[in-house]
Image: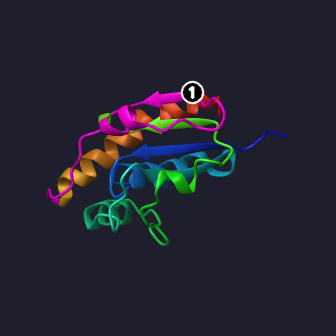
């Protein structure tokens, strides 16, 4: 039996890229992965464009909300993935050593839906296979 791996997707505001990555990874990894997302300075809500881009792909968006990294820092995390350069630079020290992966994505905040869709597709194309490889799933 395979042990479920936990991935934390980390960005600054946890309102756009990390939220889309969380939903995409959760969908792609299924039972093999537990996916969390958080921000170093979370925004008040998830960006409407991120919600719309996920829904356009037929992915669930219920229950998404920005979380502070402090809320998940003591979780048993197997991999931390930073999706913006600021989060990489300000990534906190975790209670135990955790492998890290950095893949930066364009921030579509404030841009038209098409930008969110491009970032969603870029996350799917680059982040999902990198996480699968890093976790061996």
Q: Residue 49 at x, y = what percent?
A: 25, 63
Residue at point 58%, 37% (across, down): 94
Q: Residue 32 at x, y = what percent?
A: 68, 45
Q: Residue furthest bottom?
A: 62
- Mark 1 surroundings: few (<14), some (14-19) or many (≥20) residues within 10 A: few
Decide which of 72, 123 is in the foreground and name it.
72
Look at the image and give the residue range highlighted in magenta: 86-112
Quick check: 118 above or below 104? below
At mark 1, the secondary structure is helix
Quick check: 33 above or below 137? below
Q: Residue 83 falls in which quadrant of the image?
A: top left
Q: Is 57 colored magenta in this rendering? A: no
Decide which of 49, 109 is in the foreground and name it.
109
Quick check: 60 above or below 123? below
Q: Residue 26 at x, y = what percent?
A: 55, 52
Q: Residue 103 falls in which quadrant of the image?
A: top left
Q: Residue furthest right?
A: 1
Left/right placement of residue 129 relative to residue 110 reads right
Q: Residue 115 at x, y = what percent?
A: 19, 51
């Amino acid at each position: 039996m395979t042990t479920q791996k936990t991935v934390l997707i980390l960005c600054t505001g946890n309102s756009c890229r990390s939220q889309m990555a969380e939903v995409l990874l959760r969908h792609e990894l299924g039972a093999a992965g537990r996916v969390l997302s958080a921000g170093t300075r979370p925004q008040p809500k998830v960006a409407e464009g991120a919600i719309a881009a996920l829904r356009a792909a037929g992915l669930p968006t219920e229950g998404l909300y920005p979380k502070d990294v402090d809320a998940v820092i003591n979780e048993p995390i197997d991999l931390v993935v930073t999706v913006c350069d600021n989060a990489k630079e300000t990534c906190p020290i975790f209670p135990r050593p955790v492998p890290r992966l950095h893949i930066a994505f364009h921030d579509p905040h404030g841009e038209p839906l098409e930008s969110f869709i491009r970032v969603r597709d870029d996350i799917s194309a680059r982040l999902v296979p990198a996480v699968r490889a890093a976790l061996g799933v």
